[in-house]
Amino acid sequence: MADNDFKALLAPPEARWFVLAGFVGRLQMSMLGIATILLVTSATGSYGLAGAVGATILISQAFAAPRIGRLGDRLGQGRVLRPVLLLHAVGLAGIMGGVATGQHWLLFPSAVLAGLAFPPLGPMVRSRWAARVGGTPLLKAAFAIESAIDEVIYIVGPVIATTVAVAVSPSVGYVAGMVLTLAGGLSFAAMRRTEPAPMPVARTGPSLLRIPALRVTLLFALVLGVVLGSSEIAMVGFAADLGATALAGPLVGALSVGSLLTGLWYGSRRWRSSLSQRFLAFAACLAAGLIPLTLVTGAPLMALASFVAGAALAPTLIVVYEMVESLVPGERSSEGFAWVQSALVIGLAAGVQLAGQVADALDGHHAFRVTAAAGAVALVTVVLATRLTRRVRPAAEALR
């Protein structure tokens, strides 16, 4: 039974420990966006400025993540992660200092540093799985585990961020995310036994972006990032319009619950259809599932619509990671998965900025139109992506 794959993967204690450390260290990735919105708007009242600061973090992260991943492949993950984590904490402290002192010019250079030094723990965890079970049926289940963990992160993280921000202060919510990243990231870096072996310098090869199918798959991931970023800030605006900002976390969490359940369902099945067929099917489901967000009113119906919208997210992302694993040489998996993260965060930056401007000009509910439009574009993109991912191994072998 495919369900036993999950047990087999997590049976070794060292696997459980690096998964747990990766979970704790990645919690902030779901907290940082909404925590930034709450922190900046509490001091300025501007969703546009909050969106611009968040977008700066994301764009900087997108630029740096593949390079950090490449360094991790070459030098070892632990050796690279420690200085990265320190610089990331300095950047976050600068953002808090800029808000506390009213020196808003400080927000953007601090956001650049926080983004450039954002630890790519998600790609590094997946790289460890690829090194352990790459090329076997267990890899799909491993990616399903990580997708499910990501969804748990996006369920728990926004609730933690909004609850702490409302009950204590937005600054304390920011500090909470920083502490979690440092604790999980440093623990993960210390687990050297499960690291993939460093790649010899002679095997670095040309840029992975020379693979046409990878470029188009990353384009899809970028548009998917617009979906995620715009929906997050739209949820905050929608909750604020209702006079209940604390509802933003649960509403974002409802989307992640839907994604979590379908991600586990996807990983527990033995699929006979091809990756391309599944990619197209889930992209179509996602595009259709986003439409109700633009139509419903009231918190209960929005929570239901958010759950439905999230149902196609995890399977689609798992397929994306499966494709990338097939497209890139195994010893460069951290870099390859980091390119997915970069594409996602570029899309997140665009989505946050676009939806923030719409929320400022109109209201939070209208911002969901950005989300639905991005879903339609993603469906068009995946048609092109599936045509270029039929012969994936030859492209990867050309870079070896």
Image (tube, helix red, strand yellow):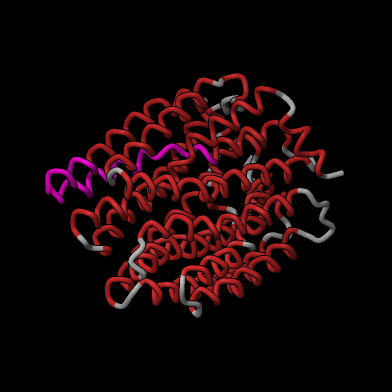
Q: What residue is rendered at 38% in x and 58% in y?
A: 349
Seen from this angle, which residue lies furthest right? 1
The reply to whether the magenta stretch includes residue 389 is no
Q: Could one spot residue 354 in this view of the protein?
A: no
Q: What residue is rendered at 42% in x and 59% in y?
A: 247
Seen from this angle, which residue lies furthest bottom? 295
| Magenta part of the chain | 96-122
x, y percent for residue 383: 64, 71
Q: Quadrant of the C terminus?
A: top right
- 215 sits to left or right of 44: right
| Residue 4, quarter of the rendered image | top right
x, y percent for residue 128: 62, 32
x, y percent for residue 306: 54, 65
Residue 82 vs residue 16, the one in the foreground: 16
**Exactly how many numbered labels are in the figure?**
0
- 383 sits to left or right of 291: right
Q: Is residue 399 above or below residue 51?
A: above
Q: Could one spot residue 109 in this view of the protein?
A: yes
